[in-house]
Image (tube, grey):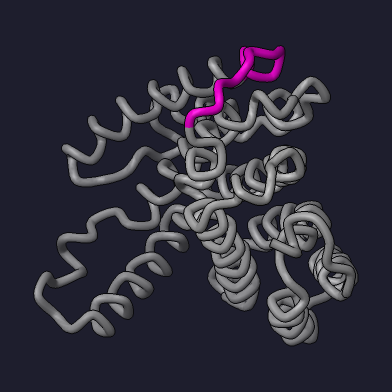
Amino acid sequence: MKNWKNLAQILLLCICTGANAGAHEIDAYLAAAQEFEKITAEKTAQGRMPRLEDKGVAALISTLSDNKRFLNQASYQQGDLLALMDMCKKTNAITMSYALFDMKSHVKQGDDQTVIVQQVAKLMGMNILSYQNELEQLHPFLIRCFARSVPLLSEFTATLKPEEFTEVRRGGIQQARNGILSIYYGHLQAISYPELKKSFKEKSSQALAEAAIPFASMIQPSTRKQIVDIATTTQKSTSGEIASNLRKIIDAMSATECTGLCKI
């Protein structure tokens, strides 16, 4: 999800933002994230990552995954975009700290780039399985957080004059599109892992389903088709709530209309 990292800054550059009600809640989120980072520093010094059974960790992860408090803000406005993206970036940093934990022991510097990519992918898969209890809540929040920013991005880009649409801004949008494809590819692949808990798969697929319509509005039909193909293949081996969520993804990503952010 690193492709989303600097999207808001790339798009907005020096445009100032206002402080609305949603932004004040984001301040509370960032404070909780900072506290979690302190605990993470303590635990990694001991050679491990924070676990739910550690003092204060379960409560912090619950706060950092609170959709109703932080993402269902009707008061979010265009001026909140940078603050909202800051929140998403914090969640992303926390999830990646789990996924890439102990990277120095598993990824050898100086190896061929292709080998390094394979080593990182293997490490991330191992860590997601090891820390699925913690990531079960954080991953769905992260997906919804990025999806919540899409309408604000769309509103902002609609205000730009043609000459303001620089290559840097266009590049930022393309990076975000690549990030969307990576989100769906990675999570849909994970659904086939027998080692992952059913509840993990249900929560992540539900978040992907909820995010499908806003994400589809940003990506082009050719990319949507790639997601449809992956979801269709994955759905064949699922049932119940997971299969229903995949059906929603397929329906949303089957749209052929390309307006707004999609056209850029």
Among the 4 quarters of the image, the one containing residue 45: top left
At x 9%, y 75%, the residue is 110
Asked whether, in this view, residue 216 is left or right of residue 146, the answer is right
Residue 238 is situated, as x and y percent measured from the top left of the image, at 78, 77
Among the 4 quarters of the image, the one containing residue 256: bottom right
Residue 101 is situated, as x and y percent measured from the top left of the image, at 29, 53
At x 79%, y 59%, the residue is 217
Asked whether, in this view, residue 194 is left or right of residue 6, the answer is right
Q: Which of 19 and 35 is in front in this view?
A: 19
Residue 29 higher or lower than 140, as above or below: above
Residue 13 is situated, as x and y percent measured from the top left of the image, at 49, 35
Q: Which of 127 and 11 is in front in this view?
A: 11
- From where the camera sits, is residue 202 visible? no
What stretch of residues is rendered in magenta? Answer: 14-25
- From where the camera sits, is residue 43 visible? yes
Residue 151 higher or lower than 128, as above or below: above
Instruction: Tell me the quarter of the image containing the C terminus.
Output: bottom right
Among the 4 quarters of the image, the one containing residue 87: top right
Asked whether, in this view, residue 187 is left or right of residue 121, the answer is right
Residue 176 higher or lower than 89, as above or below: below
What is the tally of numbered marks visible in this picture? Answer: 0
The furthest residue to the front = 163
Asked whether, in this view, residue 105 is left or right of residue 35, the answer is left
Task: Please check the rendered image and state whether residue 196 is part of the magenta-colored stretch, yes or no.
Answer: no
At x 23%, y 30%, the residue is 42
The furthest residue to the left = 110
At x 79%, y 20%, the residue is 75
Residue 227 higher or lower than 176, as above or below: below
Q: Which of 259 and 20 is in front in this view?
A: 259
Task: Please check the rendered image and state whether residue 15 is part of the magenta-colored stretch, yes or no.
Answer: yes
Residue 186 is situated, as x and y percent measured from the top left of the image, at 56, 70
